[in-house]
Amino acid sequence: MWDAQLDNSVTCAEHMQLIQERWVYADRHPMTADCTMPGALWVYVNDKCYVPQTDLAAYERVITEAVHDMAEQAGIPLHLLDR
C-alpha cells in the first residue's frame, strides 16, 4: 500500500529490498491474482489482497481461510475449530 487511498504496486525482489531500506509500507506478500484487480481490498487478518465477492459463499471462504490462518499462526490445531 503506497498511500492513504490504499493504492498498491508490485515489484521484484531486488526493488523490494530497496523499498524496505528507504520507505515505510503497510505490508507485503507474494503477488496473487487479486492484488492489482480493480476493487481489491487488503485483508489485514491474513496479510493479503482479495477482490470482494457478491455471494455469501465467497465471503464465507474468505472468513474461513482467515480464521484458519490465524489458528495456524497461533499453533491451534484446526480440528478444534470445527466444534
Image: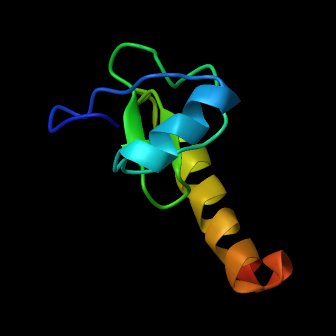
**Quadrant of the drawing holding the N terminus:** top left
Residue 62, relative to residue 46: is it above or below? above
Task: Describe residue 74's horizontal placement relative to residue 49 as left or right.
Answer: right
**Residue lying at 48% horizontally and 48% vertically, measured from the top left:** 21
**Residue lying at 51% horizontally and 25% vertically, measured from the top left:** 35
How many numbered markers are drawn? 0
Q: Residue furthest left?
A: 4
Task: Name the foreground residue: 52 vs 55.
Answer: 52
Examine the image and state in which quarter residue 58 appears.
top right
Query: Which x, y percent locates residue 4?
Result: 15, 39
**Quadrant of the drawing holding the C terminus:** bottom right
Examine the image and state in which quarter residue 76 appears.
bottom right
**Residue lying at 49% horizontally and 47% vertically, measured from the top left:** 20
Residue 36, relative to residue 45: is it above or below? above
Task: Name the foreground residue: 54 vs 45.
Answer: 45
Task: Describe residue 78's horizontal placement relative to residue 32 as left or right.
Answer: right
Task: Describe residue 26's horizontal placement relative to residue 12 as left or right.
Answer: left
**Residue lying at 67% horizontally and 36% vertically, measured from the top left:** 30
Res. 31 visible in picture: no
Query: Which x, y percent locates residue 8?
Result: 37, 27
Residue 23, relative to residue 10: is it above or below? below
